[in-house]
Amino acid sequence: MSIYEDLQPISLDGVSTYPLSSRPSKVTVKDFASPISENSSLRDYLATLPNILAVQSIRDLVVRMRRARELRKPIIWGIGGHVIKTGLGPIMIDLMNRGFVTAIAGNGSVLVHDAEIAIAGSTSEDVDATLGVGSFGGAEETGRLLNDAARHGVRDATGLGESLGRALLELKPQYENLSVLCAAYKARVPFTAFITIGGDIAHFHPSADGAALGATSHTDFRLLAEIIRRMNGGGVYLNVGSAVSLPEVFLKCVTLVRNLGFQLNDITTANFDFIQSYRPLTNVVRRPTADGAGRGYAITGHHELTIPLLAAELICGAGAE
């Protein structure tokens, strides 16, 4: 006997139901994964993936990237240093050669790690082991190269990314073939760089020149804005591994383009990251594509898995040449 004298559980007798067969469903067996065999090719493997959630998003994005290439619209990769540190440089270089990377925007850590890869074939020091003794970030060659490139960029009226690419190639580094900066410079693919003064190890080296770093990075901002202006009518912007800096830069470029009276519609944006953060979701995926201006995608996962999968779909997936 319940102690709630005037309170009875609601009756379920009048609940309305419907036949399962009459209901539209978001998942059907035709979208399921298929087992692979020992003799499966890469193309076979891609066809076995479930056409659901992230796989579906990647496939949709691939269609839009192929369309952008056909229309000769920009396919811009905004990358953080983690992309370089997880060994994805060779994939980006290959996609660049295939026309799926037509411009790059990188933060300061991209410059550090890519330059060290080109010169030494290694990067990413043990911060825990070096911070305590004050040697973290003290690599002479890295600091000198980045700061000299900034000064030379001011002298030549070029952006920081272009100037560093040229400086690296002049060194004839041993691992030039693995450097995204070197590949972009040789291919004349714009490489723009966006730094936070004080945020990179090169900024506390004796040769650091804040005015030169700021001037060349601002030149790159204006250059990226022009490339983004050309996205109208089918261009693509990918944010890969930058949670704050590049989403902010991208949004400011978008507003600059529209402030100047240019149309920026029918664009595609995507954010690839281990977790989906506020700024990429807001400044890359949602705001620039709002009100019918385009389509945004959020793809969650490790870059060392998702970017090779994207590349495989571009090259070998359904509809590939």
Image (cartoon, helix red, strand yellow):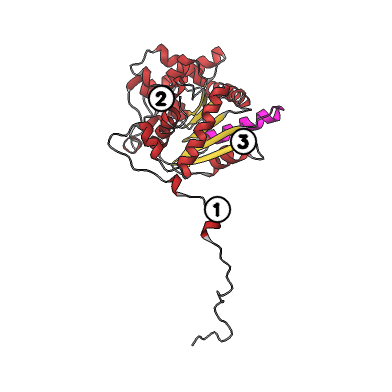
Q: Which residues are magenta?
A: 246-263
Which residue carries the number 3 mark?
A: 294
Q: Which mark is residue 24?
A: 1
Q: Are marks 1 and 3 in contact (CB under 8 Å)?
A: no
Residue at 52 percent of width and 59 percent of height: 20
Seen in the picture, residue 35 relative to 11 is either above or below; the reply is: above
**x, y percentage for residue 259?**
70, 30
Tag 2 residue = 114
Q: Nearer the viewer, mark 1 or mark 2?
A: 1
Q: Nearer the viewer, mark 3 or mark 2?
A: 3
Q: Position of residue 72 (x, y in %)?
A: 57, 21
- Give percent across and percent down for residue 299: 48, 40
Q: Nearer the viewer, residue 90 or 182?
A: 90
Furthest-left residue in view? 38
Q: In the rendered structure, does residue 261 fall within the stretch colored magenta?
A: yes
Left or right? Give the position of 133 relative to 255. left
Residue 11, above or below 316: below
Q: Amino acid at mark 2?
A: Asp
